[in-house]
Image (cartoon, rainbow, N blue to C red):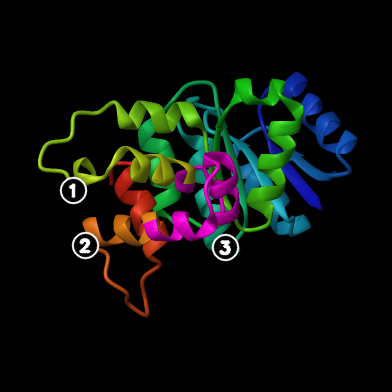
């Protein structure tokens, strides 16, 4: 796997490259700002971009904007965004721009090397990884008249794991139930959210977006 890293902190940037190298993942380019990210993506055509949300000059959302631009220039580019804090708007905007092959993690997750490398591989493979703290914060919102309120506790748990990018097999393993049971829960979730089968819609993605408050 070939990765580019966009992070303005040289120390963290080098640390990420070392962690990736230890996991057998090659860093082929680095950038310290948004335009630099777009440039290294164009130059190296990587399998994944690891991007800090806040980068120079304003340290607001330049990293995210650059990641979305890079993805528009190379559709389907897997992007793993790292953030110091839970920023719901950025998480939902990233997912809303295309839920496949995207991830949003808090930087503190890097301390768990195995978890971080797992997220890198899952996003590069086309999965979606959302930090559990982001999911928890979004769940804490007051929802009135929201069809999500009609979900059972078990269905809510299934949807939360789906939002973390888990497959049906992984959800079943986490909940200690059969895949058949998971499929029944998912079918019920789709029904309660009014997500009817349609050739141009991905109901799993739409359910996750509804869960994340879009």
Most common SS among magenta residues? helix
Residue 194 — which label?
2
Does the magenta-highlighted stretch encompass residue 182? Answer: yes
For the residues bearing labels 2 and 1, Cβ distance under 8 angstroms: yes
User: What is the magenta range?
Assistant: 162-184
Residue 155 in magenta stretch: no
Give x and y (percent) for residue 213: 28, 42
Whether the residues at callouts 3 and 2 have beta carbons within 8 Å, the answer is: no
Look at 47% across and 48% down and name the residue there: 162
**In 3D space, how far apart are the residues under numbered discs 2 and 1 (Cα atoms)?**
9 Å
User: Up-down: is 147 above or below 86?
Assistant: below
Q: How many labels were placed on the picture?
A: 3
Residue at position x 52%, y 61% in the image: 72
Residue 52 point in image, percent of width and height:
59, 32
State the residue in front, 205 or 189: 189
Q: Dot 3, how many residues are within 10 Å of its Cα: few (below 14), some (14-19), or many (20+)?
A: few
Say above or below: 27 vs 70.
Answer: above
SS type, badge 2 = loop
Q: Which residue is mark 3?
A: 73
Which residue is at 69% across, 33% downward? 116
The residue most toward the bottom is: 199
N-terminal label among 3 and 2? 3
């Amino acid at each position: 796997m070939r990765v580019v890293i966009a992070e303005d902190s040289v120390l963290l940037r080098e640390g990420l490259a070392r962690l990736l190298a230890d996991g057998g993942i090659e860093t082929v380019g680095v950038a310290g700002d948004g335009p630099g990210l777009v440039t290294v993506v164009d130059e190296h055509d990587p399998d994944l971009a690891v991007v800090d949300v806040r980068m120079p000059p304003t340290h607001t959302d330049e990293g995210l904007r650059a990641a979305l631009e890079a993805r528009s220039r190379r559709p389907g580019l897997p992007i793993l965004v790292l953030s110091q804090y839970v920023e719901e708007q950025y998480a939902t905007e990233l997912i809303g721009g295309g839920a496949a092959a995207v991830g949003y993690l808090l930087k503190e997750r890097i301390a768990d090397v195995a978890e971080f490398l797992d997220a890198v591989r899952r996003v590069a493979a086309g999965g979606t990884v959302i930090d559990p703290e982001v999911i928890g914060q979004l769940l804490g919102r007051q929802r009135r008249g929201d069809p999500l309120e009609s979900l059972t506790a078990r269905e809510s748990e299934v949807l939360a794991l789906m939002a973390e990018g888990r497959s049906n097999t992984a959800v079943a393993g986490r909940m200690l139930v059969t895949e058949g049971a998971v499929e029944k829960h998912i079918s019920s979730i789709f029904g309660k959210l009014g997500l009817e089968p349609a050739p141009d819609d991905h109901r799993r993605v739409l359910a996750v977006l509804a869960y994340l408050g879009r």
